Amino acid sequence: MINRLVIFGATGDLSARYLLPALVALRAEGHLGDRFQLTGASREDWDSERYRAWVTEQIDRHGGHHPADAKAAIAGTARYQRADVTDPADLASVIAGEGPVAVYLALPPALFPRVVTALHQAGLPAGSRIVLEKPFGEDLAGAQQLNQLLADLLPEQAVFRVDHFLAMTTVQNVLGSRLANRVLEPIWNSTHIAEVDIVWDETLALEGRAGYYDTVGALKDMVQNHLLQLLCLVAMEPPLTLGERDLRDRKVDVLRSVRLLTEDDVVRRTRRARYLAGRIADHDVPAYVDEEGVNPQRRIETYAEVELELDSWRWSGTTFRLRSGKALRADRKEVAVRFRSVPHLPFGHSGEPRPNVLRFGLEPEGLTLDLTGIGAHTNTLAPLSLTARMEPPHLPAYGRLLLDVLTGDPAMSIRGDEAEEAWRVLTPVLSAWERDLVPLEEYPAGSDGPPPRPYGSGQQRRGDLLHAEAAPPGGAP
């Protein structure tokens, strides 16, 4: 296990809100001992004393209900070095020390190539590891270039392209539910499953993130990584083991099977939009283009929806719909697996049955199965829901990710070819959107998103009906 962690961008929001609380949780659970050392590096002209005071403040604010001694231990081990993260000499000074080091790039992704190049010139100790946040590159060519730089620096097993969604308990329970229950795996295919909706709708608006968000938008920020990762776990073939090779091979197979969208497909099967001024709960929200730091000329979307199909024996004929939106009326964060209707109903004119939907609630975490049963009157159909709540995990998602990094288990990180395949899937969408083949629609903040649009013989697209479903956020009945 590596006992030295260096965070580049150590005074940023990612470090304050997620990495420091994760380290406290690891210490409280006994995963970090007295030998562990935290080094922060950033451009602020601080010394170690001031950094430790800042770490203590952030841990008190975001660190949760962990023992005081665990919080004090993490703050007490912290030291700080001012550094230009693109300067090899500065980086050599920061990573100097005894034994291997885990280097976490809590930085804007645009800096990754320059930082990785500088690390190569600085020389990492043998056995070291590097951690990168999404997105991995800005497009397919950028991902390929970054992967080559990383390959020159470290072996693939030492590169952790982390996606905290993969460490969420319910996300991992997608695999558990499928692979450990005989009742599900035999029907986990297109014969029985009509559609899978992978949704991350949130009431949060920009929240001061224009510096990052206005360069990427919803498609790159959520769909290209988080939601495609969920698609992989839902659609993958059962792996021989959950080891890094078997698991990641099967995820890559899913991405390779995604049928590339033609220009006509992109026009018909994708949507993009951004929010106008509106009201969410008890507060007013300005239009996206009026948010501080936004450049309206970029035409960045805050809502993205993509329908995909997989060319495989298991999934031919099933629609996978990936959608994410900001500043919406309600939070809805789930994977909803919608089963096909039964071939015959012996109930006369008792009404249509409720579709069977298995919902994996992501936030809050939970599991719900929507069924149809017999109501109070004989032969009358009535909706029925079975709900399970997940036990709170001992470690937060970032705690599990950091533990994997420090212990050297890359199974739940993203392999280089997997990152490239994800960009391949969305390249036709990015290209068509850049050429305005798909209109940039608008929706009021606090609404259900862009209004329904005609489809086929005047009917709404199935994706336009997602907001109208009865289940509230998180998969509760």
Image: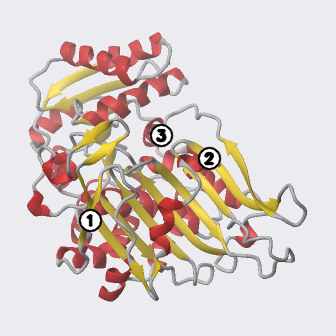
Q: Residues within 10 Å of mark 1 (few under 14, many from 20)?
A: many
- In the displayed structure, does residue 121 sit left or right of residue 388? left
User: For residue 238, what is the image quadrant?
Assistant: bottom right
Q: Amino acid at mark 2?
A: Ala
Nearest to the observer: residue 54 or residue 331 = 331
Q: Amino acid at mark 3?
A: Ala
Nearest to the observer: residue 332 or residue 4 = 332
Label 1's element? helix
Checking the image for residue 397, the label placed there is 3
Label 2's element? loop
Of tags 3 and 2, the one toward the viewer is 2
Q: Which residue is label 2 attached to? A: 476
**Residue 305: image location, x then y, percent:** 38, 67
Of tags 1 and 2, the one toward the viewer is 2
Q: Which residue is label 1 attached to? A: 143
Which residue is painted at 57% across and 64% down in the image? 234
- In the displayed structure, does residue 359 sit left or right of residue 251? right
